[in-house]
Amino acid sequence: MDFREMMESKYRDILEKYITEQSEQALYQGQKFSRKSIENKISPEELISLHKLSLTNMYPDLSKEVIDSFDILLEVMLGYGLAYREHQSLRHKQQELRTEMEIAANVQQTLLGTTIPTVDCLDIGAISVPAKHMNGDYYHFVKDEHNHISIAIADVIGKGIPAALCMSMIKYAMDSLPGSQHEPKLVLENINRVVEQNVDPSMFITMFFGMYNTSNHTFTYSSAGHEPGFYYHAAKDEFTEIEAKGLLLGVDKKTKYAQYEKAIEIDDMIILMSDGVTECRSDEGFIEKETLITYIKKYIHLSAQEIVNSLFKEIERLQHFELRDDFTLIILKRKV
């Protein structure tokens, strides 16, 4: 007995048992047969033919009208079967893509991973959460031999794999910089040349680079069109935008960037972010910067890491726990 004959015999037994008993056990046998059919890639139209054959064998006197009705059902199931098999194929491909994206996201996290440095005079907190699998934001810390802290934060206007590839390129360009060129404006000028030569003109990248001097507590920084952050002056209990202007990366390889410097006093804070923070959209529209400041004030008594975590939860709640853009937030708080 070949496989088809075996399946015909098995189905006829199940059908006879159900017609005779109409029991739950008979239905269960039908479910088992269905799973077996799927495993052996038996199409829906083949099952219709199997059912028609079993009925005509069991009931030779079955009316011609009933028998003919199976022909139209068979035609219907032919189209259904094709669509179903295409759907299953697409689901399989989708699962493969999802698996590949998860692997790529893990690789990206490893490649772009950075460690928050520890220095006595600074409390540092950072969080970066992608809206999708891949992150279009990038941030990086470097502590040099003088205990000075460099911070880079960049954002590709876009999401997905192209943005992730751009971020990987930025990271390796950063790693390739000579140690003598970590002055913020020089860093951006070097990265700008790399981006101009290697990135498609349709991709836009913003970047902020700053260096905190732990000896004299000054923060030197430059910006390539990046979202301005906030500076918190503790003695005045006052928030102001960090002033920084500069052209996006990759527009003109000869671009020069301005460099700024700010003195940081005890309990002052530097707050850096991507536009996923400031362009958060709630039910009422884009979140106002005053609202962000209100949230920061709400948690200002906490550590820097607790502040960024708490602010992320507030923003996430405003968006009904569905981020519309990558979210990156960094806080540097001077300690005694």
Image: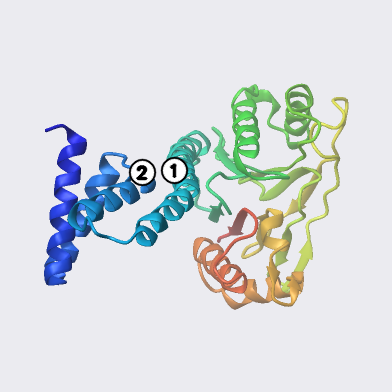
User: From the viewer's perspective, is 300 left or right of 26?
Assistant: right
Dot 1 and dot 2 residues touching (CB under 8 Å): yes
Whole-Å distance between the Cαs marked 1 and 2?
Answer: 8 Å
Q: Considering the image in quadrants, where does the N terminus appear?
A: top left
Q: Amino acid at mark 1?
A: Arg
Q: Label 2's element?
A: loop
| Residue 136 visible, this angle | yes
Mark drawn on residue 43: 2
Q: Specify the quadrant of the image occupied by residue 332.
A: bottom right
Q: Position of residue 246 (x, y in %)?
A: 85, 42
User: Percent from the top left, x then y, of residue 149?
Assistant: 59, 42
Q: Quadrant of residue 43?
A: top left
Q: Please state the horizontal and vertical placement of residue 226, each as a whole percent of the image.
A: 77, 48
Look at 58% across and 54% down and name the residue there. Answer: 131
Residue at image mark 1: 85
Q: Secondary structure at mark 1?
A: helix
